[in-house]
Amino acid sequence: VDLRRTDCKTRVGAREPALQGKPEYSFEWMGAKWLFSSQDNLNLFKASPEKYAPQYGGNCSYGVSEGYISRKPANGMFEIMEGKLYLFPNGNNSPSGAYNSWWQSGGGPGRRIVDGDLNWPKIKVKLESR
């Protein structure tokens, strides 16, 4: 998961930009190296990684809601809905098309999350078989 070396724990529960993670606070989970800005955040993640890890394996949430994996890395925009972290590609320092579409089309986030949750198991199986 490429979060541009940011601390995913600082993304959940705050609208401020995530803090940069530090190599000395790292943890291997689900085949990825996770970096955190503090020992406290690292400990919280270790205790409950599913609570802080991004949804859909860190892939673009809009793409998953549409039934595909975006080719762009979902390491820019993010949204927190009901305590869960949803990622989107970077839109050159402005909201990306995927992020805008997440909000403005297909029934908005409420419908997009339902669709993404339905699509993700099938997409995940395809990714795991590669």
Image (cartoon, grey):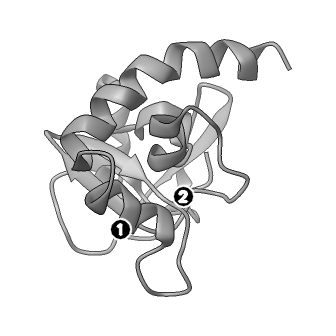
Q: Quadrant of residue 72?
A: bottom right
Please tell me which residue is depicted at 37% across the width and 70% down the height of the picture. Answer: 19
Please tell me which residue is depicted at 65% across the width and 37% down the height of the picture. Answer: 32
Name the amino acid, label 1.
Answer: Ala
Mark number for residue 3? 2
Give coordinates of residue 55: x percent, y percent: 41, 35
Q: Quadrant of residue 30?
A: top right
Q: Nearer the viewer, residue 12 or 98?
A: 98
Q: Nearer the viewer, residue 84 or 41?
A: 84
Q: Residues within 10 Å of mark 1 (few under 14, many from 20)?
A: many
Residue 78 vs 129, above or below: the answer is below
Q: Residues within 10 Å of mark 2 (few under 14, many from 20)?
A: some
Residue 96 vs 21, above or below: the answer is below
> Relative to 32, is 79 on the left or the right?
left
> Relative to 20, is 17 on the left or the right?
left
Name the amino acid, label 2.
Answer: Leu
**Mark 1 — residue?**
18
Residue 68 appears anywhere in the view? yes
Give coordinates of residue 103: x percent, y percent: 27, 59
* Cα–Cα gap, marks 1 and 2: 9 Å
Residue 16 vs 13, above or below: the answer is below
Please tell me which residue is depicted at 73% across the width and 17% down the height of the picture. Answer: 126
